[in-house]
Amino acid sequence: MSFQQVRDLGPRDLRRAIRAGRYAGPTAGCAPGRLQGNLAILPGDLADDFLRFCLRNPKPCPVIGVSEPGDPHIPALGADLDIRTDLGGYRVFRGSDGGRHVGTDDLTAIWRDDLVAFVLGCSFSFEDAVVRAGIPLPHVAAGRNVAMYVTSLQTAPSGPFRGPVVVSMRAFSPSNAIHAILLSDRYRLAHGAPVHIGDPAAIGIADLSKPDFGDAPDLAPGDIPVFWACGVTPQMAIRAARPDLAVTHEPGHMLVTDLSADAAEHTLGGVGPASTSTISRGATS
């Protein structure tokens, strides 16, 4: 199935299409209005350290769900959701591989009784609000992955988990950048407001045309690059920790939940529902 065929599917039908191998692309722009999540799976003996890592770094690692040890289901995020099969791509890390990973689309064969799954908020959730406000996002319209970069910013460590902050970048005209920033600030479970605006060199990015993850961005003359904390950050921390087994999502391939992104900010994040009706293009105070 193509992106155009799946983009308006509901979250359950989208997960079923992914589970059946009918769709394996990025989920930016899919299931509009639904909360999407990054994934990190670790052995139980590292779960407490990783949870503390997330709490110490809430911008890149906002926690929206945690499984019980050995249980691949998180019913609060989706009734039929299966962590092992419902993402279009996974990265499997083993400590003996020196931080390298192998890709797979199914975790069933390697699932263990001690594994704990963490679902962390994703910026794709606020992108729907940006699009609803009439602000263009070229990568969403084209069905491409957002550009992501490893920065010189550092996370606060916890146990063996530490490393650089990864950011996602979207470029806007000056007026649209203001509105996108205001909208994103209401979505704390989707990384909230950006961590940097403007000169990429100030956060250690040498060349915007060469992202570390995702697709190269399209920047129009006069566009301002805006950088949000990204859920790929835990992958860097996991590579540093070198557990005997760990799993993350393939960048851009998220877990799509049944939850409304707006409602989740109230029920999970303690922030009132966002509305694009109060922040629109060209709005004045």
Image (cartoon, grey):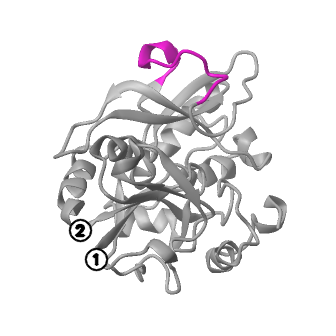
Q: Which residue is outermost to the bottom?
A: 79
- Residue 207 occupies quadrant: top right
Instruction: Examine the structure image and report whether residue 182 is included in the region drawn in magenta.
Output: no
Which residue position holds label 1? Answer: 69
Residue 47 shown left or right of residue 85 in the figure: left
Type of secondary structure dominating the magenta stretch: loop
Give the image location of residue 279, x and y in percent.
Answer: 57, 44
Residue 37 shown left or right of residue 41 in the figure: right
Q: Which residue is pictured at 38% across the width and 34% down the height?
A: 165
What kind of residue is marked 2? Answer: Gly
Per the rendered image, the range of residues in magenta is 197-211
**In the image, is residue 143 above or below residue 257?**
above
Q: How busy is the neighbourhood of tag 1: few (under 14 within 10 Å), some, or many (20 plus)?
A: some
Residue 44 marker: 2
Q: Is residue 83 visible?
A: no
Foreground: 71 or 100? 100
Q: How busy is the neighbourhood of tag 2: few (under 14 within 10 Å), some, or many (20 plus)?
A: some
Give the image location of residue 27, x and y in percent.
Answer: 65, 58
